[in-house]
Amino acid sequence: MNIFNKDQPFKFGKAVFPNGGRYGPVTHEHLDITVILQGEATVVIDEAEHRCVAGYAVFAYSEQRYEMIFPKGTGHYVRWCHTGELVMPQQYKT
């Protein structure tokens, strides 16, 4: 079973949020891996919220909403990889 298109783009990057901030919301199907190197984040995947702290990674698939919220008062540093819509059958997405 393939879950990616033959020419699926994968984008890599890093971001610094020196005093809080936000990534998203991404409001379409989204696959994301984010490593939190410094700080913490509240991660919203569709309607569920999760807390992630430095030293951990988030591997998230969302269908409708993906967002990372970094609290004010401290610095945050993350590295990420994300891609767009997947091609796997719907039965495997739920």
Image: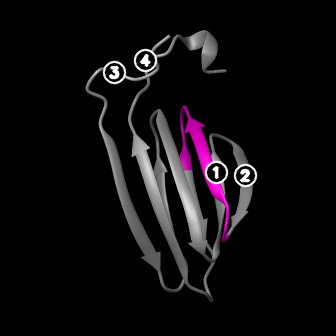
What percent of the width, then of the height, locates residue 67? Answer: 55, 54
Query: Are the residues flagged by discs 1 and 2 in contact, CB closer than 8 Å?
Result: yes
Kindly state the secondary structure of the residue where label 2 is placed: strand
Upstream in sequence: badge 1 or badge 2: 1
Whether residue 21 is visible to the viewer of this picture, yes or no, is: no
The residue tagged 1 is 44
Is the residue marked by circle 1 packed among few (<14), some (14-19), or many (20+) residues within 10 Å?
A: some
What percent of the width, then of the height, locates residue 66? Answer: 54, 47
Above or below, 35 relative to 31: below
The residue tagged 3 is 5
- Region rendered in magenta: 54-66
Kindly state the secondary structure of the residue where label 1 is placed: strand
Upstream in sequence: badge 2 or badge 4: 2
Structural distance between the alpha carbons of marks 2 and 4: 25 Å
Structural distance between the alpha carbons of marks 2 and 3: 29 Å
The residue tagged 2 is 49
Quadrant in the rendering for residue 62: top right
Upstream in sequence: badge 2 or badge 3: 3
| Callout 2 amino acid | Glu
Q: Name which residue lies at 39% across and 39% down.
A: 83
Is 85 situated left or right of 6 in this image?
A: right
